[in-house]
Image: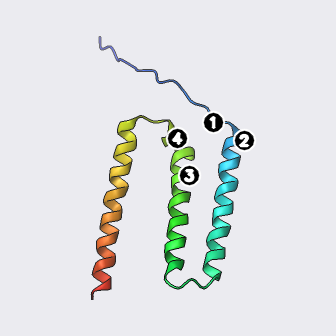
Amino acid sequence: MVKVLVMNKPSHIISYGKLTTVWLVLLTLTGLTVLITRVELGGYKVLGALAIACLKSGLVIAFFMHMKYEGRLLRWLLFLTLATLAIFIGFTFFDVLYR
């Protein structure tokens, strides 16, 4: 007979109020992104839109994907993955810039 050890993690329940607040913040940031595209900021337009997109993805990952309630190891692995992705995208931009 095989025994399976199951580790019970304390469950977390996010209230509807908090999820609704995060959703409204995401909608506001989406409106801000649209507003930034209408204002003439030169090269900072893309930087502003990317900064807002990073903030929005952070909110989605933290609350809707419950990463805020995970352990340190999983958070660091997510950070390492996103940093690696950012490095690869940065190398791609440098390659396109100097062609």
Residue in the picture at 67% in, 52% down: 23
Q: How many numbered discs, if any? A: 4
Q: Which residue is mark 3?
A: 59
Label 2 environment density (alpha carbons within 10 Å; few <14, some 14–19, many ≥20): few
Q: Which residue is mark 2?
A: 17
- 13, above or below 77, in the image: above
Residue in the picture at 52% in, 46% down: 62
Q: Amino acid at mark 4?
A: His
- 33, above or below 68, in the image: below
Q: CA distance from mark 2 to mark 4?
A: 15 Å
Indicate which disc, 2 or 4, sits on the residue closer to the N terminus. Answer: 2
Give the SS element for disc 4.
loop
Give the SS element for disc 1.
loop
Label 3 environment density (alpha carbons within 10 Å; few <14, some 14–19, many ≥20): some
Q: Is residue 17 left or right of residue 92?
A: right
Give the SS element for disc 2.
helix
Residue in the picture at 50% in, 36% down: 69
> CB under 8 Å between callouts 1 and 4?
yes
Q: Amino acid at mark 2?
A: Gly
Q: Which residue is mark 4?
A: 66
Indicate which disc, 2 or 3, sits on the residue closer to the N terminus. Answer: 2
Asked where in the image residue 29 lies, by quadrant, the reply is: bottom right
Q: Is residue 95 left or right of residue 8?
A: left
Q: Which residue is mark 1?
A: 14
The x and y percentages for residue 42 are: 53, 85
